[in-house]
Image (cartoon, coloured by chain):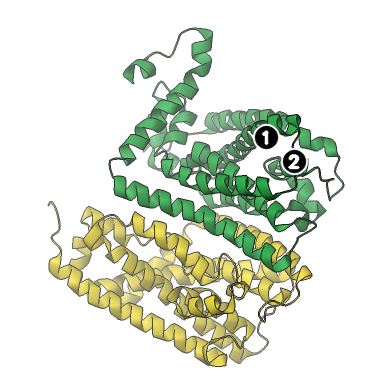
Amino acid sequence: MADLLARPCGGTVERLTRPARVYALLAWTWSRALAQYPASLALMTFGTALGAVAEIFAVFVVFRHAGALDGFSLAEGLLIASLANLMFAAADMLMGMVEGLGQHIRSGSLDVMLVRPVSPLVQIATDRFAVRRLGRVVPAAAVAGFALYHCDIDWTAGKVLMLPVLVVSGVAIAASVWTASGCLQFFVADAREAANSVTYGGHALTEYPLSIYGKGVVYAVTFAVPLAFVGWQPVLYLLDRPDPTGLPDLLRFAPPFVAVAACTAAALLWRLGLRHYRSTGS
Amino acid sequence: MRVYSAVYIAGLRRYSTYRAATLAGILTNSVFGCINAAVLLALFSVRPLINGYDAADAVTQVFVCQALVATVAILGPPLDLGERIRSGAVGTDLLRPVPLLGWWLAEDMGRATFSIVFRGVPTLLIGTVLFDLLLPGTAGHWAAVLASVALAAVIGFALRYLYELAGFWILDTRGIWAVVGLVGPVAAGVLLPLPLFPPGVADVLRALPWASMIQIPAEITLGKESLPGGSAAGGLALQAGWAAALLLLGARLTSAATRKVVVQGG
């Protein structure tokens, strides 16, 4: 471990992959630490898994009463909800800890991170890395598999190849939204809960077909905060459904590009915030 | 009594210093209110009546829920008591000339008062601006709602006090929160209004203490006949019963805990 952390320089490839390797190392360290209390970890993982079950169950109840919402059947509704849950849960696990930034600023632990030879973003993201959040990914993936099987999908080679691309892009977009909203705390330290309205609020929003919220919301989450590319556009693509709000069908191929743009924007915002940061001196 | 009012005021003042956090909280509650309301409006436009609830009832419940959710703290945060039990600082609390339960009740009621006035009321106002809410029309009805909210806050405190009190036996109460943080919102009607569940399930959940924090106050606001006894009085009686029972249990367990506690270190 000391070996990896002590060598900030090296070949180009090594320099580029270093943050990812340090991330994996620190995440693994925290996971092992939490595994020292196996019963507690198992209970909390189980609790997190039930959380995903409860949210998808709510979608199930709504669709059972409605039959169909905006032309989306129960199976299609479950597909939307489970994909959104899957991607937001994965993003929450990878970057969710950034929302603790305000606490790090107040307590001064951000200063400690700044003097270590590892990216402070990696350190914050892995701080108390919550491996229990995997518990949310598992039931979401199971329901997504079930829904994919029951939806009327015309499986072409293109769709099979696109599915993993769309999932990775979705996770990347959600993780960028998480990071970017966490960065707000550089400017307003108490803003943690306001960020929740974008992160957890975005999660709640994307659990249902976006068209039920009306055009204004769909446009906002397409062009302002790109949450529509996390679950909504991929599902429209998989189901070969024209966009109910009249946006061009070409958008459903955008997620990989949006993901790159979102990650870049989040990284820039992080740097801007870090440069703006003045230590509290404590 | 003077001690309690001093602690109450200290609780109130403590939370009044977090102004940006309060604004952020109003924003978050309003955003969640709008999202949940939009989903339920879409549902009720397909099925106009579900188990006695219509679209206006459901949207009103959503905003009553968002106005109350921070006050009763059903999704947390936990009382600081848990951390003090774990660290042993509770020893200081036990030295105070007032009972542990009363001290924390007074502190938390200060927090709850600040929360309902500066976070709950603005959230509800935003709801009335954006949606057609069915709010009470008479002073008597409002008085019933106010009493219901006060009882909900006491129940919210009593439950969280019991969760943290478990720390005397199991030290780490995060496992408890992992379970009740999940069961609570479902059983209280935060996840979905209880009338969307099958009537038998809804009736069982309505009788449990969590419903008395959100679902019962919402039904009292709406003047629903699904309340126990069919009226607001029945709902208030249920809430008062839970508040009394949980506080009594809390007091009993406190004395049991203090008889066994050995504060570590020194």
Depth check: give the residue in front, A144 or B65. A144
Residue A275 falls in image quadrant: top right
Give coordinates of residue B233: x percent, y percent: 52, 92
Q: Are marks 2 and 1 in contact (CB under 8 Å)?
A: yes
Q: Which residue is mark 1?
A: A163
Does any portion of residue A65 appear in the rendered image?
yes
Whole-angstrom CA distance, mark 2 to mark 1, is: 8 Å
With B77 as the anchor, is A142 left or right in this view?
right
Give coordinates of residue A185: x percent, y percent: 53, 42
Q: Which chain does the residue under circle 1 lie in?
A: A
Q: Quadrant of the N terminus of chain B?
A: bottom left
Does dot 2 land on a helix, a strand or a loop?
A: helix
Label ID, residue A238: 2
Residue B47 falls in image quadrant: bottom right
| Picture colour for chain B | yellow
Above or below B5: residue A119:
above
Q: Residue at x 29, y 75 (%)?
A: B250
Amino acid at dot 1: Leu
Depth check: give the residue in front, B29 or A162. A162
Q: Callout 1 environment at 10 Å: few (<14), some (14 to 19), or many (20+)?
A: some
Marker count (numbered): 2
Amino acid at dot 2: Leu
Q: Which chain does the residue under circle 2 lie in?
A: A
Q: Residue at x 73, y 66 (%)?
A: A66
Q: Residue at x 57, y 64 (%)?
A: B191
Give coordinates of residue A258: x percent, y percent: 71, 32
Above or below A35: residue A245:
below
Of the image marks 2 and 1, the number of the one nearer the N terminus: 1
| Picture colour for chain A | green
